[in-house]
């Protein structure tokens, strides 16, 4: 029993000693915190009441520091939560200069008021705060389609992929808007098309999400038909032939080959083409002239001549 009693007494003494140590430390800690001393305080800077039709530029100050004499309790709270001072931009804004300047004197007043301190603030890290503002402007920009399209064999687009509307009004800071020349859509991928396709396509605004857009998407449409190849024989016209000059072409017509949709196959005829050769551009050494297509239907594709040169003879 005596051994058990002795251990219990020792344990109680240790607990009592530990209690007095904790109390002593706590009293010492409170005494230290209650004293005043000078230290550097870092604060965040926030801005409010931005003037109409302007926005904060990206290079404005977002924090500053200063020396402050205060109690340890204050500094402990500043360490636990970083203070923020708020600057009323409209109060210092100059419309002529398109900026706001807060002098050192006004800055100290704002800091003192914001942190509720009756002790003077010293050694502010900046002499003054210049708030730079951007004008808000609007600009109409064309929309560029980003697409990856493939067609089933024998099929092609009768009309190129189009969108409606094909422009967007973008609003935002002048420094961001001024350099923009177009807005691109997110990529649309259409595989092995054999029929018309339509739908909605979103604008790719991920890199400029801070701007405002009149629309966020546009309607797309592509007209697809089956195509086939067609060949026609087109008469050749000689241009700039001098008066009195007789010329003989080795062939009076040339074959033109092109792709056309099945539905428009019979709509294309010889009269829809004009092929010329320019006498002034002839090659006298080779006795040939280059052929050129100067008229063709807009509904055909992949047009080419079976031979783009023609031999000739001149009779005197």
Image: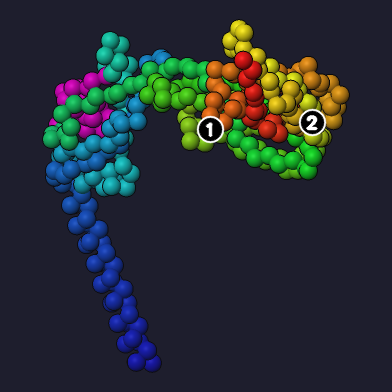
Residue 80 vs 173, above or below: the answer is below
- Which SS class for mark 2? strand
Circle 1 is placed at which residue position? 205
Residues at marks 1 and 2 touching, judged by CB atoms closer than 8 Å: no
**Residue 219 appears in which quarter of the rendering?**
top right
Give the extent of the magenta segment: 100-120
| Of 103 and 288, the residue lying toward us | 288
Which callout, 1 or 2, points at the residue further toward the start of the chain?
1
Q: Position of residue 223 (x, y in %)?
A: 76, 29
Quarter of the image with the N terminus is bottom left
Query: On the picture, is 196 further left or further right than 160?
Result: right
Residue 231 numbered mark, or none: 2
Q: Residue 23, percent across and down?
A: 26, 62
**Residue in the picture at 22% in, 52% down:** 30
Q: Nearer the viewer, residue 174 or 305?
A: 305
* 119 magenta-colored: yes
Q: Nearer the viewer, residue 49 or 276?
A: 276
């Amino acid at each position: 029993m005596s051994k058990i009693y002795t251990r219990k007494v020792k344990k109680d003494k240790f607990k009592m000693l530990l209690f007095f140590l904790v109390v002593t430390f706590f009293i010492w800690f409170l005494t230290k915190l209650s004293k005043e001393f000078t230290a550097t305080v870092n604060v965040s800077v926030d801005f409010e009441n931005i003037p109409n039709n302007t926005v904060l530029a990206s290079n404005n100050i977002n924090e500053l520091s200063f020396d402050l004499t205060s109690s340890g309790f204050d500094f402990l709270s500043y360490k636990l939560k970083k203070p923020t001072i708020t600057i009323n931009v409209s109060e210092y804004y100059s419309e002529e200069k398109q900026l706001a300047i807060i002098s050192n004197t006004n800055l100290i007043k704002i800091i003192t008021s914001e942190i509720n301190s009756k002790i003077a603030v010293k050694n502010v890290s900046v002499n003054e705060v210049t708030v730079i503002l951007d004008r808000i402007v609007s600009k109409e920009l064309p929309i560029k389609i980003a697409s990856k399209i493939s067609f089933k064999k024998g099929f092609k687009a009768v009309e190129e992929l189009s969108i409606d509307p094909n422009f967007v009004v973008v609003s935002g800071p002048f420094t961001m808007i001024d350099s923009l020349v177009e807005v691109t859509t997110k990529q649309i991928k259409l595989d092995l098309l054999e029929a018309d396709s339509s739908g909605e396509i979103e604008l790719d605004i991920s890199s400029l999400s801070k701007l405002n857009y009149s629309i966020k998407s546009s309607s797309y449409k592509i007209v697809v038909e089956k195509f086939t190849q067609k060949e026609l024989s087109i008469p050749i016209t000689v241009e700039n032939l001098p008066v009195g000059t007789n010329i003989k072409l080795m062939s009076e017509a040339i074959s033109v080959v092109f792709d056309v949709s099945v539905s428009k196959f019979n709509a294309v005829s010889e009269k829809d083409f004009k092929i010329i050769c320019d006498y002034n551009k002839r090659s006298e050494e080779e006795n040939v002239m280059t052929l050129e297509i100067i008229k063709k239907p807009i509904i055909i594709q992949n047009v080419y001549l079976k031979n783009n040169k023609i031999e000739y003879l001149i009779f005197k």
